[in-house]
């Protein structure tokens, strides 16, 4: 085992062509990841014609690295401009962007990039450790558990709402859940709240909603108040490698949180069906819930950047497990990756243990090394990126609004989403203007859909008795505990997130 | 050679020449032009990879042209199909979508803004027969054992109204199968559910289950269409004429997989050039090899032949249409 493990690493590092391809893959992955609205799926789909001629291992390393580093660069625009690339990055926006406003963009970027890298590497380790127990763990989660996990995530809203704002939080969360019901009803086949508009049949575009709720209001407020994103002028702030480095050091300072959220992220990735954004949001909620000073969250708490970033990158390692060993991809991104693996002559399935163990280890190492390359590259260039937060808003706002518009359009390629962007932007701006929390909206939208779909399935399969499954009981216990804790902290007048997040 | 034969030969030669000239003028039309190839799904997955493959090779056989693939996902392929149908009939917009839309057109479902019989058919690339796939831990090993089940067993389908749902409901009702439908299993959710054991089986396209069965997680008990000989054909097991008609309808869906079509009214010479390029692409060894790696070997049909097959599939008896409408809740 050990010799296969390190043999694979040696073979990979000593092959200049593999390393060259990996470097190119990291570059492409980072550029695609930094562009809002374009997912990693597209980059792999476009790369498929190129891998036809590649050798099996090299092709697999190329595609996996490209996919894995996608999330590492996604948070740059969420932190800098409050423009999240997708649902995952939205969680990072909540604390990352306030940090940029305080002139700490460098520190936030340092922390988030390092956290992504650490998450990616821990995800790879979890991958390696979990191989022997993969089957029982993955198969323990059925629609009943997905439903309860989604409900658990929704209860975190109570912590995210902020001081004396628990009811506002619940209202906004419920609003998100109402909008999650737009689209084709999974059990009756009736299009709900969609009129004759086919583009609404698949539900409201999460990317569009996230851009409208977070990015557009920030830009309106920046344009109205004038000045730059950072309230602190460049002379008074230390935009330097030193600030970046202090951000990097935040991750070892919060090593226990980073470890926990990486593991949770990897586990969520391992169990197909819960979706990527759930990992980032559950871990963000976990960070707030376990913090001794939850009131800092939403105002630029570095833990609020570390938790979602570790989680969303760690889930890549996790989601590779069912893809490789069951041949059942856990996400649409993994489905594309699996299609490409088949082209390369890799047959995912239980036989991977025996026939391709060296390849499995190469892929694990590729996750580790790819993340290291991505982190070093990004840390090197972001010092100059961070300076953008000191540019006058009048110059910056038009560019960012273009970025937002392109992101909302490119994600599904439907112009109608621009109207949705406009409509929800009003709501987002209203929430921001009147100091209502915004994060519960995205949680309601993302988890509400999962909750509804899995509830239908669980009821169809087991009726009401699904609540008595052993794992269900554990999750119900966790939900009750969370609610009790929320009521307790709220009664004591101490709650997590101050207004306006 | 008597002079009648001479006439015939001359006429044939002239005909061939003018035909050739017509196709040639069509081919010339594409020099310096950009063709948009619409794929009615998101990037990734079978339709996208097939679409990109077809676009790449058609570009190769229409010299000077540039093919651009555009993904238009949503509403179960309806958005993409409607867009292709409504595009300008100049031959510069063609694309691919799910054959299952035939069901939607038969019952006149909402959202359908096309008439498949009027489209300019260019070709179809593959066949995708349907199978009854059963999880390996289930005791059901044959068609007969499925029929003998005392209590209904759970079968997974995608959302209500999807092609997989329609086929499962129709077959369950018409053949009185002991099946309880569980809906909302999209993508590969059904396979994972079969591994967990909550779902016993699924009626799905064979290509989507080949990997699953190869890994020993499941087995096929019966197949609809296709040339594979390892599984009995459902048509040989169903005796009731109404049932047989439905099986034939489902089979016709599987036969016309991975199609390429354009909007109605593309000029004849341009359609001829597109069909010609499509044919050359399908006969290209390189494409065949790559298609085989992607999913299934190439089993092409071209132009008019596809239209004939589509028309045949759309032309159903009232009883079948009633069954379909029932399946779609109409």
Image (cartoon, helix red, strand yellow):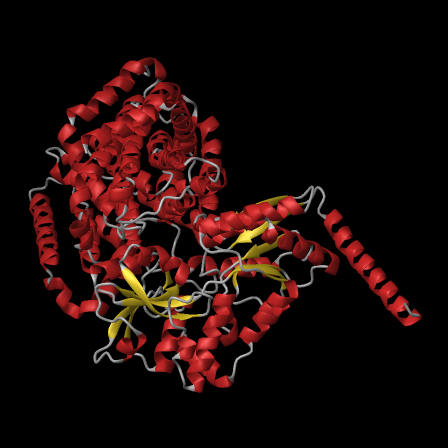
Q: Is residue B306 left or right of residue A145?
A: right
Residue shown at 38% from the left, 65% from the top:
B204
Instruction: Pinpoint residue B303: horizontal percent, then vertical percent.
Output: 64, 63
- In the image, A225 versus B195, the foreground residue is B195
In this view of the protein, can residue A498 be seen by the observer?
A: no
The quadrant of the image that shows the N terminus of chain A is top left
- In the image, A184 versus A211, the foreground residue is A184
In the rendered image, the vertical position of residue B78 relative to residue B2, given as above or below:
above
Residue shown at 63% from the left, 44% from the top:
B60
Q: Is residue A264 left or right of residue B123?
A: left
Looking at this view, name the residue that lies furthest to the right. Answer: B3
Residue shown at 31% from the left, 75% from the top:
B143
The quadrant of the image that shows the C terminus of chain A is top left
Q: Is residue B44 left or right of residue A294?
A: right
In the rendered image, the vertical position of residue B131 relative to residue B274, given as above or below:
below
- In the image, A75 versus B24, the foreground residue is B24
In the rendered image, the vertical position of residue B35 relative to residue B244, given as above or below:
above
Instruction: Pinpoint residue B235: horizontal percent, then vertical percent.
Output: 43, 77
Residue shown at 73% from the left, 60% from the top:
B268
Instruction: Pinpoint residue A243: horizontal percent, then vertical percent.
Output: 28, 17
């Amino acid at each position: 085992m050990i010799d296969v493990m390190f043999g694979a690493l040696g073979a990979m590092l000593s092959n200049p062509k593999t390393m060259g391809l990996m470097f190119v893959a990291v570059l492409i992955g980072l550029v695609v990841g930094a562009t809002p609205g374009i997912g990693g799926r597209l980059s792999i789909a476009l790369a498929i014609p190129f891998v036809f001629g590649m050798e099996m291992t090299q092709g697999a390393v190329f595609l996996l690295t490209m996919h894995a580093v996608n999330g590492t660069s996604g948070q740059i625009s969420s932190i800098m401009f409050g423009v999240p690339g997708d649902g995952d990055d939205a969680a990072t926006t909540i604390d990352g962007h306030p940090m940029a406003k305080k002139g700490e963009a460098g520190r936030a970027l340092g922390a988030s990039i390092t956290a992504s890298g650490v998450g990616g590497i821990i995800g790879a380790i979890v991958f390696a450790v979990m191989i022997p127990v993969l089957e029982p763990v993955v198969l323990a989660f059925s629609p009943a558990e997905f439903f309860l996990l989604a409900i658990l995530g929704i209860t975190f809203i109570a912590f995210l709402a902020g001081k004396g704002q628990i009811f506002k939080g619940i209202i906004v969360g419920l609003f998100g859940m109402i909008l999650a019901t737009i689209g084709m009803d999974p059990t009756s086949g009736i299009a709900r709240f969609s009129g004759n508009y086919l583009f609404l049949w698949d539900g409201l575009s999460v990317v569009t909603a996230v851009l409208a709720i977070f990015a557009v209001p920030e830009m309106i407020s920046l344009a109205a108040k004038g000045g730059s994103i950072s309230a602190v002028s460049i002379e008074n702030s230390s935009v330097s490698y030193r600030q970046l480095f202090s951000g990097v050091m935040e991750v070892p300072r919060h090593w226990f949180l980073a470890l926990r959220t990486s593991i949770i992220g990897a586990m969520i990735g391992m169990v197909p069906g819960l979706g990527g954004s759930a990992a980032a949001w559950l871990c963000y909620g976990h960070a707030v819930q376990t913090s001794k000073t939850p009131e800092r969250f939403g105002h630029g708490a570095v833990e609020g950047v570390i938790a979602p970033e570790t989680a969303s990158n760690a889930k890549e390692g996790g989601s590779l497990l069912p893809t490789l060993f069951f041949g059942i991809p856990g996400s649409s991104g993994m489905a594309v990756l699996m299609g490409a693996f088949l082209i390369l002559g890799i047959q995912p399935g239980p036989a991977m243990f025996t026939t391709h163990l060296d390849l499995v280890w190469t892929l694990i190492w590729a996750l580790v090394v790819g993340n290291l390359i991505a982190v070093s590259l990004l840390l090197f260039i972001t010092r100059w990126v961070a300076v953008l937060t000191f540019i006058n808003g009048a110059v910056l706002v038009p560019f960012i609004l273009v970025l937002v518009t392109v992101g909302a359009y490119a994600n599904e390629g439907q112009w109608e989403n621009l109207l949705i962007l406009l409509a929800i932007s009003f709501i987002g701006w209203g929430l921001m203007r009147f100091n209502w929390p915004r994060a519960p909206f995205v949680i309601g939208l993302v988890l509400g859909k999962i909750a509804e779909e899995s509830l239908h399935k669980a009821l169809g399969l087991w009726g009401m008795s699904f609540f008595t499954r052993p794992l269900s009981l554990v999750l119900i216990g966790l939900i009750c505990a969370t609610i009790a804790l929320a009521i307790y902290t709220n009664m004591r007048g101490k709650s997590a997130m101050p207004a306006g997040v | 050679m008597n002079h009648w034969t001479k006439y015939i030969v001359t006429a044939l030669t002239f005909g061939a020449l003018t035909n050739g000239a017509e196709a040639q003028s069509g081919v010339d039309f594409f020099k310096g032009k950009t063709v948009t190839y619409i794929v009615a799904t998101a990037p990734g997955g079978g339709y996208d990879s097939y679409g990109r493959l077809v676009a790449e090779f058609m570009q190769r056989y229409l010299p000077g042209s540039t093919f651009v693939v555009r993904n238009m996902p949503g509403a179960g392929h309806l958005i993409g199909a409607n867009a292709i149908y409504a595009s300008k009939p100049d031959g510069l917009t063609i694309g691919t979508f799910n054959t299952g839309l035939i069901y939607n057109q038969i019952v006149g479902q909402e959202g359908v803004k096309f008439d498949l019989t009027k489209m300019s058919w260019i070709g179809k690339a593959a066949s995708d027969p349907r199978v009854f796939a059963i999880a390996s831990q289930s005791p059901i090993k044959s068609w007969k054992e499925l029929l003998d089940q005392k209590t209904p067993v759970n079968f997974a389908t995608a959302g209500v109204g999807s092609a997989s749902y329609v086929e499962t409901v129709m077959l369950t009702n018409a053949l009185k199968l002991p099946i309880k439908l569980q809906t909302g299993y999209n993508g590969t959710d059904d396979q994972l559910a079969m591994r967990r054991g909550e779902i016993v089986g699924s009626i799905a396209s064979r290509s989507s289950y080949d990997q699953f069965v190869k890994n020993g997680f499941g087995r096929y008990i019966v197949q609809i269409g296709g040339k594979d000989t390892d599984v009995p054909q459902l048509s040989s097991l169903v005796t009731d004429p109404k049932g047989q008609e439905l099986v034939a309808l489902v089979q016709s869906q599987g036969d016309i997989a991975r199609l390429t079509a354009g909007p109605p009214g593309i000029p004849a010479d341009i359609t001829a050039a597109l069909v010609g390029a499509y044919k050359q692409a399908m006969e290209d060894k390189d494409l065949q090899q790559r298609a085989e790696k992607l999913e299934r070997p190439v089993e092409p049909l071209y132009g008019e032949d596809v239209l004939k097959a589509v028309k045949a599939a759309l032309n159903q008896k009232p009883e079948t249409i009633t069954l379909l409408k029932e399946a779609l809740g109409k």
